[in-house]
Image (cartoon, rainbow, N blue to C red):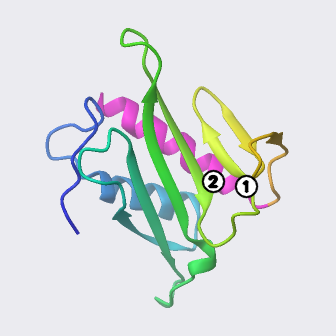
Amino acid sequence: MREFEPLEGLAAPNADLSQLVAAAADLSRKPLRHGVVLTSAEGDPDCCLRLEVRDTDGQRQPEHDLELEIYRSGSSLQTSLNLTLAWLQDDTRPMLWHGSHAVWMDPSGLRCERPQDGMPLEALARRLRALLVDLD
């Protein structure tokens, strides 16, 4: 796995984004355990990560894998940190966009209700935004 090239303003010296994301996911989605793989291409302005999931016995649980995208949007004076979380194995499930608040979207991009198992993803998104904003 290559080293993470942080988005400008997203990482403090000695901060390892993969470890931060994995720890936040482990805390938010107990008892699942998470490994993080950088999937964005070199030079990509956004950061894309795959969260690979294992159960407490170490067995892979790919049905729980997530895709995380971290990006900034807005004018150069008022940029904001946004992220999306989506299940990798089921593109019929809604995805979570989290900027200033959480918004669930169905596969067509229309706003929808939070899925029954969506609360841990919202908790993860809040944790990640707090961690990443604190590193700014």
Q: Residue at x 50, y 90 (%)?
A: 59
Does residue 114 sit above or below 103 in this rendering? below
Q: Amino acid at mark 1?
A: Gly
Please state the horizontal and vertical placement of residue 52, each as a whole percent of the image: 47, 72
Q: Residue at x 21, y 37 (%)?
A: 12
Please state the horizontal and vertical placement of residue 91, each as a whole percent of the image: 69, 64
For label 2, the crowd category at 10 Å Cα-Cα, with few meaning under 14, some 14 to 19 and many 20 or more, is many
Q: Secondary structure at mark 2?
A: helix
Image disc number at residue 121: 2
Please state the horizontal and vertical placement of residue 69, each as a whole percent of the image: 47, 48
Q: Secondary structure at mark 1?
A: loop
Compare residues 56 and 37 and report the one nearer the observer: 37
Q: Quadrant of the N terminus?
A: bottom left
Q: Residue at x 30, y 54 (%)?
A: 41
How many angstroms separate mark 1 from mark 2 (CA)? 5 Å
**Residues at badges 1 and 2 in contact (C-beta under 8 Å)?**
yes
Residue on which the image places disc 1: 118
Number of callouts: 2
Q: Amino acid at mark 2?
A: Leu
For label 1, the crowd category at 10 Å Cα-Cα, with few meaning under 14, some 14 to 19 and many 20 or more, is some
> In the image, is 6 to the left or to the right of 47?
left
Please state the horizontal and vertical placement of residue 54, each as a whole percent of the image: 50, 81
Image disc number at residue 100: none
Does residue 62 sit above or below 44 in this rendering? below
Residue furthest to the top in view is 77
Q: Which residues are magenta?
A: 117-136
